[in-house]
Image: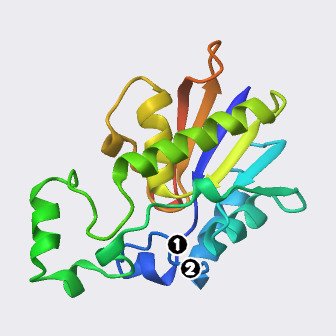
Amino acid sequence: MKVILIRHGKTKGNLENRYMGTTDEPLCKSGMEQIQSLVSSHSYPKAEVIYVSPLKRCIKTAELIYPGKALILCKNLKECYFGEFENKNYLELAGNKNYQEWLDSNGTLEFPGGEKQKDFRKRCCQAYETIIENCGRKDTALIVHGGTIMAVLEKYGVPKKGFYDWQVKNAEGYLCQLQEDNRSLKVLEKLKGREEQT
């Protein structure tokens, strides 16, 4: 069984390097165009079951990649809530003591007023486990957020890597093969965005 993990297309906030988190922003024009171009070049694997974060940017991405397919919304696939940093970029956070401390920690400190990182990772992995139990062993796509992909692959990805090692850009993702333990995901291929296609 294949599991396809895809990060949503670009939003205005992504173009402005904002910490979008749970801010519910739609895809921007260039984000939709990028997805459409990748669909036209058959860059995304086929899937029978589609699970989606309930945020607008993921729903629209799923509709563009898998038109006509039923989408199963899963609230626990949402991105982390970034608290004090939510919907702000590094320019707006310049001089913010909490932000500087977070940067100095290489992203290991908690987001001030935000969701705890261990709680975020746990809910993403629990959502993934439920999906695997309910998808009927059909090839399944998850149209989600960068952090969601990182959380799932940090725990279940093969080869084993750290959280930040699984980062992907907008419209990118991973094609994986579910292993015999019905949890682990052998990463077969990185799905690259238009800028990196060769």
Q: Is residue 138 left or right of residue 106?
A: right
Circle number at residue 30? 2
Report the residue at 71% width, 39% height from top: 131
| Residue at mark 1 | 10
Total residue callouts:
2
Quarter of the figure with residue 160: top left
Residue 41 lies left or right of residue 21; in this view the side is: right
Q: Secondary structure at mark 2?
A: helix
Residue at image coords 62%, 72%: 57
Other residues around mark 2 within 10 Å, as few (<14) / some (14–19) / many (≥20)? some
* Whole-percent x, y for residue 89 in the image: 29, 80
Most foreground residue, 135 or 170: 135
Q: Amino acid under label 2?
A: Ser
**Viewer-nearest of discs 1 and 2:** 1
Q: Mark 1 is on which residue type?
A: Lys
- Asked whether residue 197 is in view, the answer is no
Q: Is residue 2 above or below residue 29?
A: above
Relative image position of residue 25 (x, y in whole percent): 56, 81
User: Eyeballing the image, is 99 above or below 29?
Assistant: above
Instruction: Please give left or right for residue 66 compared with residue 27 in the image.
Output: right
Give x and y (percent) for residue 104.
9, 59
Q: Quadrant of residue 86?
A: bottom left
